[in-house]
Image (cartoon, rainbow, N blue to C red):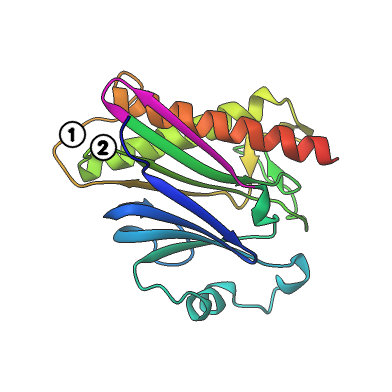
Amino acid sequence: MSRALMSVHVERPWLTVELNADIRALSFAPYRPGNVDCGQILWREVRDADLTREFNAIEWLAEEVKLPSAVAMLTSRNVETFVHHRVAVGSVVAEAVVTVGLSNAERVGLRRQMRAGTGTINIAVATSAELTMPARLEAMSIAASARTAAVMDAMIEIESGVATGTGTDCIVVASPDGSVEFAGMHTEAGEAVGAAVYGAISEGVSAWLAER
């Protein structure tokens, strides 16, 4: 069996995903977004009460992060509720670590007033496939699709219909740089990324619903 792509450590308020090597991470995370070299992916847990309109969360997070090679996200979800899934398809492995809160649930194409609560889905997914930048973009679309499918399968009804995600979701896709040009649903990489994210989100949604 190939070695793990991720090792996960929790010490609230931090959830730390150590990658097995410095690889490339593509994200729209609040700390070090874009396509960057990455050694760790972090979650910083915050209280809902801290997230006032006057609070500059991005500047604050930049001061909190002490690892220069990290990409970091924010959540008000208890980081101990994380889910970690690993999937192998052919020669490709993908691992996803997620936290799931749905009090800020939305339906794509519509929006409602943002609500307080543990209301975000944060996803970190790594694959052993050595992806080009366009393939990493494609893998991000697969991760987003898998997130949406898992949330829709839970049939969470909000005013605008069945929820497809939340208004504050964040996705990080990590892979080695290489020559693999495609990561869509017809590829081993796409299947592995999609299955890892779908499985992790489904489990996280079920846990969130069970708490309520």
Dominant secondary structure of the magenta stretch? strand
Give the alpha-carbon distance from disc 2 to disc 1, as whole Å: 7 Å
Report the magenta residues as a range: 82-92
Looking at the rendered structure, the secondary structure element under dot 2 is helix
Residue 50 placement (x, y as % from top left): 73, 73
Examine the image and state in which quarter residue 137 appears. top left
Residue 198 placement (x, y as % from top left): 53, 29
Query: Who comes first in sequence, dot 2 or dot 1?
Result: 2
Q: Is 44 on the left or on the right of 86, as rendered?
A: right
Q: Is 173 on the left or on the right of 164, as rendered?
A: left
Instruction: Kindly identify the amino acid type of the residue bearing the numbered disc 1.
Output: Val
Looking at the rendered structure, the secondary structure element under dot 1 is loop
Instruction: Kindly identify the amino acid type of the residue bearing the numbered disc 2.
Output: Ala
Identified at 37% across, 25% down, the residue is: 88
Quadrant showing the N terminus: top left
Task: Return the residue found at the far front.
Answer: 1
Q: Residues within 10 Å of mark 2 (few under 14, many from 20)?
A: many
Examine the image and state in which quarter residue 67 appears. bottom left
Q: Which mark is residue 124?
A: none
Are the residues tagged 2 and 1 within 8 Å (C-beta)?
yes
Foreground mark, 2 or 1? 1
Residue 42 placement (x, y as % from top left): 49, 61
The residue wearing badge 2 is: 135
Residue 184 placement (x, y as % from top left): 32, 26
The residue wearing badge 1 is: 180
Identified at 45% across, 36% down, the residue is: 143
